[in-house]
Amino acid sequence: MSMQRRDFLKLLGLSTLVGGTGGGAVFNVLKPGELEASTAKFKSTSGRTWAMVVDVRKFTPDQYGKCIKACHREHNVPDFGNPKDEIKWTWTDDFEHTFPGQGHEFMDEALESLPFLLMCNHCEKPACVRVCPTQATFKRASDGIVVMDPHRCIGCRFCMAACPFGARSFNWRDPRKGGFPMVGDKPVIPNPEYPTRTKGVVEKCTFCPERLVLGKEPACVEATEGSGALVFGNLEDPHSEVREVLGTHYTIQRKPELGTNPRVFYVIGG
Amino acid sequence: MYDKGKVIVGLVVFLGFATFPFYNNIGKKSAVPEPNLKTPVIEQMVVKKCIEPKEIMRGEHMQILNQWRDTVVREGERKKMTIGGVEIDTSLQKGCLHCHSNKKKFCDACHNYLSVKPYCWDCHFDPKERDV
Amino acid sequence: MLDKAISGSRTYWAWLGFLGLISAAGFVAYLFQFNYGLGLTGMSRDVTWGFYIAQFTFLVGVAASAVMLVIPYYLHDYKKFGKVVILGEFLAVSAVSMCILFIFVDLGQPMRVMNVVLHPTPNSVMFWDMIVLSGYLALNIVIGWHTLHAEKKGVAPSPWVKPLIYLSIPWAVSIHTVTAFLYAGIPGRHLWLTAIMAARFLASAFAAGPALLIILCLIVRNVSKFDPGKEPIQTLGKIVTYAMTANVFFFLLEVFTAFYSGIPGHQHSLEYLFFGLDGYSRLVPWMWTAAALAIVSLVLLIMPGLKKNEDILAIACGTVFVSTWIDKGMGLVVGGFIPNPMERVTEYTPTFPEVLITIGIWAIGFLILTVLYKVAISVREELAGN
């Protein structure tokens, strides 16, 4: 009968502890995080799987607006000023609507009225990607980000029906006609370095690949820098800050029962 | 043959319509456009050249752009290239237009002549017109 | 045979002209939508499919129902359907054409529609829906046209048609099953996430399609010398009865599961549809109309002897058609989006251009149907004349 790897490691750890030499190194192997990391099934090709922790305890009231503004400015998210044409990448809602069915009538009133930052969950098994007929939305093999290729989108909006988190928006009309403040007959585009979209395609939060490639954090995370309200990092690295927070706090995901496995986690108390 | 007269009249009318663009333009000649290459960045280039020879660029720049957009958007590879001493991104905005910062005299000159309307600019921006 | 379509009475041309005018109006409205974007419709971030997809879903059912004629005629050798089976096949052609148009006008970037073929994606149900719908269209055109042509010449259809006819049977089931899967495989939309969806779709399809066909048969008898016959119409009436009963039964199963289990998520959409949710109740009158019509239709169809009277049968079929059109169209599609994933309610009403485009596509569908029926009927009249 062959010995299981885990058992072998245990034995090895015990023996070195007793022996006294090199015990530290082996003991590290046995730390819960390490073992979990070695057995977790990540499929990324770069060894990085990006994730976000939203720590609502650390958010100050003005920070939500800052995050949303930073994101929407960075990506030229239009504002038509009416709910019918609305496009949003990140936004807030209260506990009851962020985690439907998870609250109850006697819950902490402070928590009940707290805003929660919402965005694309960059699910491990995204329903939007599964249904897209053209692979216009897809999961990046390198780092698990769920991206939109607006060049390919035919605007069927199947992904919007499929996303159980309401993360996706559609360009019901040309964003450059009515989506931005005008000077003369020209729209004022907040960030000319980043494209706008065209009418008839779907868009959503992307975890900012254009910033990640430069070694920067997503725009919303940068907007809360120093406060720890948003923690972004590599899930596959057991020493990353996200893993640190996830390993030491009680965190929840939106609608975990649907099996999409969101990569955005929430610290709600404690 | 039934309705011989009607058929012939119909054919003549159809041919008239179908060939209208040709006889309407007979004898007219529009000037062949000369894309302008004088921009601050190109002027300062050590060796004045593009990523591919002129002939290939002229015929295949759209395929190259399609390829770029797939490698950048879909594969997440944003490689930098050095062309004639100038470093550019795999990007329409930060690549092509970095040197060709005169969209009106470069891109539009040919596109208008050929009456093609690329939808790149529905989303992407052309930098401020800069030429020499 | 197509020449039969360009020689007709004044009424025929007037009818075609009328349909042509309506579809032209729809086309103009579509040009506006094409320029402005889908913002011209009543759809929003929360209700992302509306009137167009509602029509699409309903019409896939109408198309699939041709199989209710093909099975008795070709598998059970029920000869009496010999005269109407072509009407069913041509109805399917017209219905699938409308389906394709409804999908097309619902696209945000219609010029890129070929991306579905260029980047085939087998994990997307929509990809399969495209395949089965275009396949079904081709099957029915080929089968319908060829069998009619053979009939005209007084010869038996070529042997290669038989396998195609047999193939069209599971194919018809597949178009509606796949269409149901568009909805039934989506997590987080409780009204849609139900295993009985495909079965319910088929039941309502086999009620609505043959109901429409009965009405069409009655019209055909009135406006032409071709009589589909009393008995096939009565047999179709029986099919409608069984299918509509099953349809209502399946719906009640949904109601039981949602309300007896007491799971709020499963109840919300049904509550919205029939009673209103959080004070929003725009679809309530429509849904009760559908329910009332369904009950009326069942009474008329099931009460012994009533449907023997063709006028009553026609009324029953009309109620079945409208009832399923509301329930499976707006009720199912819009109801699925309400409440939204954050459990908030955003309502939806189609706009004027949206309705105009929709009516325009229906007009195109009827135009196709009229032309195809004209050909079939002319061939029959000619044969009867000889």
Image (cartoon, rainbow, N blue to C red):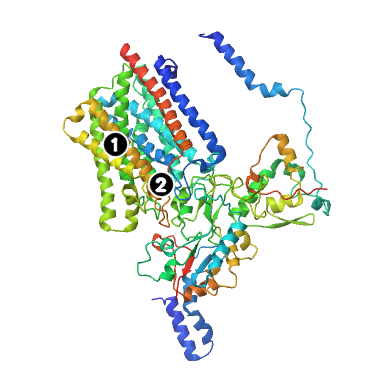
Which chain does the numbered disc 2 sit on?
C
- Name the residue type under label 2: Leu
Q: Is residue C45 left or right of residue C285?
A: right
Image point (44%, 36%), residue name: C355
Q: Residue at x 28, y 32 (%)?
A: C317
- Check the residue under mark 1 and report the chain it is in: C
Residue C182 marker: 2
SS class of the residue under badge 2? Answer: helix
At a point 63% along the width and 42% down the height, the residue shown is B119
What is the quadrant of the C terminus of chain C in the image?
top left
The residue identified by callout 1 is C207
Residue type at numbered disc 1: Ala
Q: Nearer the viewer, residue B85 or A24?
A: B85
- How many labels were placed on the picture? 2
Vertical side of C91 occupied by C197: above or below = below
Image quarter hosting the N terminus of chain C: top left
* Place of residue C92 in the rendered image (x, y in percent of width and height, measured from the top left): 38, 32
Q: Secondary structure at mark 1?
A: helix
Labels 1 and 2 share a subunit:
yes
Q: Is residue C217 above or below residue C102?
A: above
x, y percent for residue C163: 36, 32
Q: Nearest the camera: A187 or A32?
A: A187
Residue A109: give x, y in percent of width and height.
41, 70
Whether residue C99 is visible here, answered yes or no, is yes
Q: Residues within 10 Å of mark 1 (few under 14, many from 20)?
A: many
